Image (cartoon, helix red, strand yellow):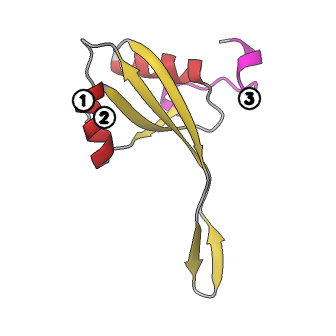
Amino acid sequence: MADSQTKSKLVLRPDQVILRPLVTEKGIHRATRHNQYAFEVNTLAGKLEIRSAVESLFNVRVVSVATQNRKGKKKRHKFRMTPTRNWKKAIVTLNAEDKISLF
């Protein structure tokens, strides 16, 4: 991974790139029908870093990676409106023979 393709010069380990899997109803549907899995990822990680992290952590072959930067929502806390944090979502499409057993 070249430094020109990342937002930061920080080198992230695979366990720092993938924060948690997003297990939702829509995610289960994508996993069974389209072999796509969703993860919450580090906001500094690029598509190539996400691809290599998923391949090394789960021993699968990645076909494509799509990312989304999600904005935080405003939540009410007593008398104030405080925003939740922004986060990054990655939807990873795997090869037809590969599966991840978390979903």
In the rendered image, residue 9, in percent from the top left (x then y), is placed at: 76, 24
Numbered disc in front, either 3 or 2: 2
Determine whether label 2 and label 1 are within 8 Å by CB.
yes
The quadrant where residue 32 appears? top left
Q: Residue at x 66, y 23 (%)?
A: 11
Around disc 1, counting alpha carbons within 10 Å, would you say few (fewer than 14), some (14 to 19), or many (20 or more)?
A: few
Residue 46 drawn above or below residue 23: above
Q: Nearer the viewer, residue 71 or 34?
A: 34
SS class, disc 3: loop
- The residue that disc 2 covers is 30
- The residue that disc 3 covers is 7
Q: Residue at x 27, y 15 (%)?
A: 98
Could you tell me the amino acid type at mark 1?
Arg
Residues shaded magenta: 2-17
Of the residues under marks 1 and 3, which one precedes in the sequence? 3
Residues at marks 3 and 2, CA–CA distance in whole angstroms: 29 Å
Note whether residue 94 is visible. Answer: yes
- The residue that disc 1 covers is 33
Note whether residue 101 is visible. Answer: no
Could you tell me the amino acid type at mark 2?
Arg
**Does the magenta run of residues contain 15?**
yes
In the rendered image, residue 92, in percent from the top left (x then y), is placed at: 42, 26
The quadrant where residue 69 appears? top right
In the rendered image, residue 96, in percent from the top left (x then y), is placed at: 27, 13
